[in-house]
Image (tube, grey):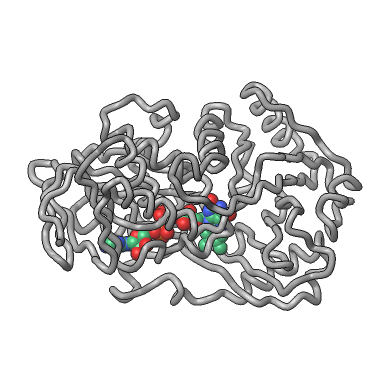
Amino acid sequence: MFPTEAKVVVIGGGVLGTSAAFQLADDGNEGVVLLDRGPIASGTTPFAAGQTGYLTNNREWLPFTAWSLEYFENFEARTGYPIDFRQTGSLRLALTEKYLPDLEARIEAGREYGEEFEMLSAEQATKLAPGLEAGKAKGILMVPRDGYVDPKSVAVAFAAAAQDKGVSIHTNTAVRDVLLNDGKVKAVVTDSGTIQTDWVVLAAGAWNRQFAQRFGVDIKTVPVRHQAFVTAPIAGVSPEQPIVRITEPQIYVRHEGGGLLVGGYGYRPLSFDMNDFPDDFEIPALASDKIYIDQLHQAATEFFPALKDAVIIQERRGLPTIAPDAKLVVSEIPEAEGLIVASGCMVGGISKSPGVGRVIADIVGGKESSLPAHTLRADRFTDEYNDDTRLRSKCEQVYSTLYLDVI
Ligand SMILES: Cc1cc2nc3c(=O)[nH]c(=O)nc-3n(C[C@H](O)[C@H](O)[C@H](O)COP(=O)(O)OP(=O)(O)OC[C@H]3O[C@@H](n4cnc5c(N)ncnc54)[C@H](O)[C@@H]3O)c2cc1C
């Protein structure tokens, strides 16, 4: 039966919404309802590369990413469901002196956190990642605990675990509006009926900003297109090889199905206003930008020459959300008491999903989070981003330099 009341309504069954729903229920909250306009994981989540980077150069932020990584390492024990987490490690290559301080700052932050990391030679890197031409690198950092997951399996596992803990899940149920009274959340209006509630978690991915505008809330994150491709099997590529991240061309390359999965930032950045799409728009209908793929292919071929003749068998694309200061927004909204937004994933929502769900459960529980939740507040932006054109242009710029603005 469709609920008419709930303690918390979570809008969006992507990786962020399902993580929140599970962790809310895991904390003992009863009356949690999770809604999605399609099936579970029908937004950007299933198209991700699923990489779980955590070694940031930001000491304040490291506890959040490290906590999320530890969650993936113990996912089955925490949720009851296995995920295929392949902890291959990763190599981060800086091609110029300019980015060596970034590698050193990561090592230093990791050391303070209690972990040691080493720099590798080009020969050592190529041994680990066959086919990689690393001769141009000025520095190569190995991060052994990095890895990747099948992104859809994470959302599906969180949803199944949430249901086991009593969360009421309703798919193919679009939320049309959130009703506020005197600045407080009162109800959500859906295709199937209205649910009275004091708490709403808005985790609608690319739709967050325009959806919230319907009830007068301005969320300062913007959907920006991100693309990747997968090749047919390539001789020598191994499932054990580490992810390779190269700073200056802003690319990542990892094993997928015997071939390589290649993605990258800053290639023809394009943001969207979701009102420009039809109401029934779904992520797979997002048009491919062939020039983006060509540029990415060309950039990656310089480091993996076997890509030159490799056949592209799949493209992955979606609309991750970007904030103007390149950080997540996971916060109650000051002008709408009881509304918590989970946005600004920065093309890292899979990786950060455990921490995002934790912060949301802590907000509802009235607890001071053990994670640095204060850095994720929605009211941290200056008025200059009240202007939509300015906000979009800044977010496109942030997307363009995701690997480069690290120091
Ligand atoms: C090519 C590519 C590679 C990527 N690689 C990585 C990576 O390696 N590592 C990483 O961590 N991240 C990666 N990402 C980013 C990652 O995919 C996102 O950060 C993450 O999926 C965002 O999840 P979400 O839950 O916020 O949004 P979504 O997955 O988009 O979920 C939002 C959900 O809300 C639902 N919804 C929307 N509006 C409504 C409504 N009105 N009513 C009900 N439901 C609604 C949608 O149907 C959807 O299911 C990548 C993304 C792409 C495109």
Q: Residue at x 72, y 74 (%)?
A: 232
Q: Nearer the viewer, residue 213 or 121?
A: 121
Count up the numbered dots. 0
In the rendered image, the residue lying farthest to the left is 182
Quadrant location of residue 50? bottom right
Q: Is residue 150 left or right of residue 29?
A: right
Q: Position of residue 363 (x, y in %)?
A: 30, 33
Quadrant where the N terminus sits is: bottom left
Which image quarter is the C terminus in?
A: top right
The residue located at (58%, 54%) in the rendering is 84
Residue 109 picture location, percent across and down: 64, 27
Q: Quadrant of ligand 1?
A: bottom left
What residue is at 23 percent from the left and 52 percent from the top?
Answer: 33
Q: Quadrant of residue 29?
A: top left
Q: Position of residue 164 (x, y in %)?
A: 33, 49
> From this viewpoint, is residue 62 visible?
yes
